Amino acid sequence: MRKVILTESQAKLLLEEIDKNDSIQKLIFCNPSDIQFEVSNEIPAGVSVSRNLFHLTPVIEGKEIDGKFVNFLAEEVKINGEQYYQLHINVNKEIRRLGIAYKLYLAFLLQDYPVCSLFKNRVSSFYDENWSENPSDSAISGLWAKIANEPGIVVDDLIDKNGNKVGIKAYHE
């Protein structure tokens, strides 16, 4: 084996890559029940909110998952006097389609936080109302269908005080 001398910047890049791989591996292979969340009111720059919005940092085995991999927000929503959290998630393009969003939603639900998805906040709702399509929200519909099949999780329509279906909700039994 040869000895190799690294500069400080090379060592830093190598350590960052190791940390990135460790974080991604933890996200992909953990059980949702292994995920905790560090909650803060720190809101990304440029995001204006009219309701309480919380930044959720996933923590797996004591390791915080950096926001450059997953940005996860919970917005408080009250409908008919009941409180829910509408979740907003952005997963880094490099690690999408690996079940990470589903796993984080399920982890949040398993911690007994009721969740909702309001149709008016989906991009596809705008397109549906204007007789067009946009596939950007198809992942959300798939995620909710998968959550509905999860034992111990109840998914139902969310009805406003006027009897209109305004979204869907989920909670842990």
Image (spheres, rainbow, N blue to C red):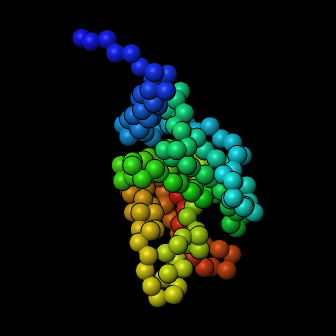
Q: Residue at x 52, y 29 (%)?
A: 63
Residue 170: x %, y % from top left: 53, 58
The answer to whether 47 is drawn above or below residue 157 in the figure is above
Whether residue 126 is visible, yes or no, is yes
Looking at the picture, tell me which residue is in the foreground, 7 or 22.
Answer: 7
**Can you say whether 102 is above or below 81 in the image?**
above
* Quadrant hosting residue 6: top left
Residue 4, given in percent of the width and then of the height, sits at 34, 15
Does residue 7 appear left or right of residue 117 in this picture? Answer: left
Out of 7 and 144, give the one closest to the viewer: 7
Residue under the point 65% across and 56% down: 75
Residue 1: quadrant of the picture = top left
Q: Quadrant of residue 117?
A: bottom right
**Nearer the observer, 118 or 27:** 27
Report whether 22 appears left or right of 123.
Answer: left
Q: Residue at x 73, y 55 (%)?
A: 52
Residue sitting at 67 percent across and 80 percent down? Answer: 162
Q: Position of residue 93 (x, y in %)?
A: 42, 53
